[in-house]
Image: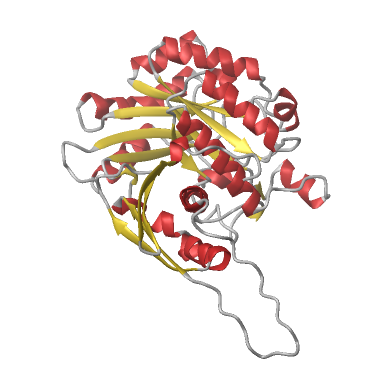
């Protein structure tokens, strides 16, 4: 039931409606995103944590973390914050969980609020930054500026808490260049983690009205994949952990649910990482394979020339095989069509770090080239 960040880290989510949010962002309908209409009581929070803990293995090496998502947790009254945090803190003090995190707005962070969070054992604060371009923030109805982000980030770090950022791609008025600039500004603030969310058009939002009037055009899935891929490499190059790409699919967040337009895909991160793996393979295979040229067929002959086919062998860690081969084998098909690779053989080499690919051979010729995706050049035309 609990959603793992990895095999050793489990998140126990508690969703809070946006009661504390003083603004209505054009893209936001938290009740639709979370499926939560009422603020959970102290007893309900405790019950949810207990329910999730019952499904998590009791191994001492496993990390269990309660995360308060949804509304701007620090913008509600201190009384309500204490109501929500008290049961989580009791589990933390008893050693039954290992951490607590909250998500909030940059302009809802100050010394008093962080003092309260610290008193309840909160270790991570995620800020809904969305963009560092003030024009984009204004068009999105965020109600804060990039300066608020800089101030809040400094405060969170001064309190010794882990700092997280959430960024949205494809907002009204946004461009790929602005997103890249935002990423560079966020990297300079040295967060510990980042989430990347391509903008979706949800029912009941101002963005849905703009979309229906033809005043907003969402990114396509391919555009969102390419732009997310670029930012993923930038953040990983800076040593920043990207813990999510794309909204978590749910009954509400689906094409049969509340999503009416935009780059929704139930395996969006896999698409991004598969596209990045394809870039890595092309980087390794540069100058080793020729692009397949379209065949020209003379009308007076029925004899067709067959193109030379290639066999490529690569080595990857066990966990990366499906990503390197591509979502539903998309990378295998890509290299078959573009480079006439009849066989893309993947072998397991668990001495390699995750996110690396080793070229073993091409048509029987041995190689020993390795590329790390965190050091893959980010190309402007990708």
Side (left or right) of 195 relative to 211: left
Side (left or right) of 301 relative to 63: right
- Compared to residue 95, the image places residue 55 above or below, namely below
Side (left or right) of 246 relative to 49: right
Q: Which residue is drawn at 62% across and 45% down?
A: 382
- Compared to residue 342, the image places residue 31 above or below, namely above
Q: Which residue is drawn at 58% across and 25% down?
A: 184
Locate residue 19, reporting x and y percent: 57, 30
Identify which residue, 297 or 1, lies in the foreground. 297
* Residue 24 is at least partly visible in this image: no
* Residue 117 is at least partly visible in this image: yes
Locate residue 344, reporting x and y percent: 41, 64
Q: Which residue is drawn at 52% across and 23% down?
A: 187
Identify which residue, 271 or 92, lies in the foreground. 271
Identify which residue, 33 or 165, lies in the foreground. 165
Locate residue 23, reporting x and y percent: 67, 28
Identify which residue, 381 or 54, lies in the foreground. 381
Side (left or right) of 154 relative to 123: right
Q: In which quarter of the image is residue 134?
A: top right
Q: Quadrant of residue 300?
A: bottom right
Q: How are the residues colored?
A: secondary structure
- Compared to residue 271, the image places residue 196 above or below, namely above
Locate residue 101, reporting x and y percent: 39, 28
Q: Residue at x 56, y 56 (%)?
A: 254
Give the total number of marks visible in the rendering: 0
Q: In which quarter of the image is residue 82?
A: top left
């Amino acid at each position: 039931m609990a959603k793992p960040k990895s095999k050793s880290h489990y998140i126990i989510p508690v969703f809070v409606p946006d009661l504390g949010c003083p603004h209505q962002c054009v893209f936001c309908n938290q009740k639709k995103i979370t499926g939560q209409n009422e603020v959970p009581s102290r007893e309900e929070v405790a019950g949810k944590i207990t329910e999730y803990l019952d499904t998590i293995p009791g191994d001492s090496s496993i990390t269990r973390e309660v995360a308060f998502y949804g509304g701007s947790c620090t913008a509600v009254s201190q009384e309500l914050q204490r109501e929500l945090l008290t049961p989580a803190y009791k589990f933390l003090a008893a050693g039954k969980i290992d951490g607590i995190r909250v998500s909030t707005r940059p302009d809802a962070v100050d010394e008093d609020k962080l003092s309260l969070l610290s008193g309840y054992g909160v270790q991570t604060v995620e800020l809904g930054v969305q963009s560092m371009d003030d024009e984009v923030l204004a068009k999105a109805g965020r109600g804060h500026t990039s300066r608020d982000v800089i101030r809040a980030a400094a405060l969170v770090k001064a309190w010794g808490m882990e700092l997280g950022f959430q960024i949205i791609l494809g907002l009204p008025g946004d461009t790929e260049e602005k997103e890249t600039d935002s990423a560079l500004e966020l990297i300079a603030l040295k967060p510990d983690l980042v989430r990347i969310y391509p903008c979706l058009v949800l029912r009941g939002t101002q963005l849905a009205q703009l979309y229906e009037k033809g005043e907003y055009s969402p990114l396509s899935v391919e555009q969102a994949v390419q732009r997310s891929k670029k930012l993923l490499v930038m953040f990983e190059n800076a040593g920043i952990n990207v813990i999510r790409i794309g909204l978590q699919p749910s009954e509400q967040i689906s094409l049969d649910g509340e999503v009416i337009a935009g780059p929704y895909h139930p395996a969006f991160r896999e698409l991004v990482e598969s596209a990045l793996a394809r870039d890595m393979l092309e980087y390794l295979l540069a100058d080793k394979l020729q692009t397949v040229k379209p065949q020209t067929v003379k009308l007076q002959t029925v004899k067709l020339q067959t193109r030379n086919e290639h066999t490529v062998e690569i080595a990857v860690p066990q966990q990366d095989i499906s990503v390197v081969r591509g979502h539903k084998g998309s990378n295998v098909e890509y290299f078959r069509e573009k480079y006439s690779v009849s066989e893309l053989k993947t072998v397991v080499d668990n001495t390699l770090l995750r996110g690396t690919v080793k070229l073993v051979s091409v048509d029987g010729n041995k190689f020993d080239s390795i590329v790390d995706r965190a050091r893959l050049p980010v190309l402007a035309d990708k």
